[in-house]
Image (cartoon, rainbow, N blue to C red):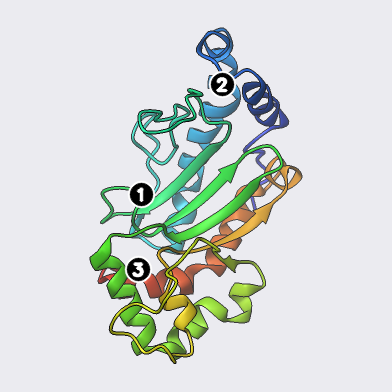
Amino acid sequence: MSNTISFRPAMFTFLNDLAANNDREWFAENKARYEEHVKEPGLEFVNDFAPYLEKLSPHFVADSRPNGGSLFRIYRDTRFSKDKTPYKTNTGLQFRHEAAKDVHAPGYYMHLQPRQCFVGLGIWMPDGPATRKIREAIAEDPAGWKKAAYGKRFTDVFSLGDEEGLKQPPRGFDPDHPYVEDLKRKSFTAGAKLTQKQVTSPGFIDEYFKMCKRGSPFMAFLCEALGVPF
């Protein structure tokens, strides 16, 4: 077990300050704080988690590149948003499947934000063909889905996502299927809350690994449904 402290309270202090001063001038004056307390610890965590990730599955990637890797950018894309604040007030990491080209693929995720930290996993808003494959897998193997998404070892840690789904069962699927509500899903995700105390405690990386491991049957089901190795 590692006693390393991956993240420190200064990260949350910076993110709180950023939320109160979300403009380019303030960020420029405080960019060194961002680098020291958010970006560098995030990239170190990605590197440190790589051998743990290999134990979960050799098909997921810990990419410590400062741009385009596992650590999400702090900059918001405001082109199509009414909210023009330039910076995210959280930091996020995602360990994506090697077959992924973007975030719409199976992945392990961590969201760090003052009073809103959580672990996530699964696939968010997959495209039409991928969504159909997952729905077909659930429809054809309800016992496997029950074990993956509703088994006690999983539900002791994770809850399925509550993203908005279809109003009616998808066309071509049995409306009386035992998991018809899951067939309506547009995303197939699960999450577990974290506290700031957990995140900033020694050995957090081991705790994160154990949580991800609990989610492995869920991830394996999604990967098999999509025809990619787990």
Residue 112 quadrant: top right
Instruction: Report helix, strand or loop for mark 2.
Output: helix
Read off the residue under disc 3. 230
For the point 52% across and 27% down, which residue is it?
40
Report, in whole angstroms, how far the alpha carbon at label 3 lies from the one at label 2.
Answer: 35 Å
For the point 45% across and 83% down, which residue is it?
180
Q: Where is residue 230? Give x, y as percent.
A: 35, 68
Which quarter of the rendering shows the N terminus?
bottom right
User: Disc 2 or 1, which lies upstream in sequence?
Assistant: 2
Question: Disc 3, disc 2: CB below 8 Å?
Answer: no
Report, in whole angstroms, how far the alpha carbon at label 1 lies from the one at label 3.
Answer: 17 Å
Report, in whole angstroms, how far the alpha carbon at label 2 lies from the one at label 1.
Answer: 24 Å
User: Disc 3 or 2, which lies upstream in sequence?
Assistant: 2
For the point 41% across and 88% down, which residue is it?
175
Q: Where is residue 14? Give x, y as percent.
A: 65, 23
Image: 191 above or below 35: below
Image: 162 above or below 147: above
Observer-nearest residue: 19 or 47? Answer: 19
Instruction: Report helix, strand or loop for mark 1.
Output: loop
Read off the residue under disc 2. 34
Read off the residue under disc 1. 103
Q: Residues within 10 Å of mark 2 (few under 14, many from 20)?
A: some
Amino acid type for the residue under numbered disc 3? Phe
Amino acid type for the residue under numbered disc 2? Tyr
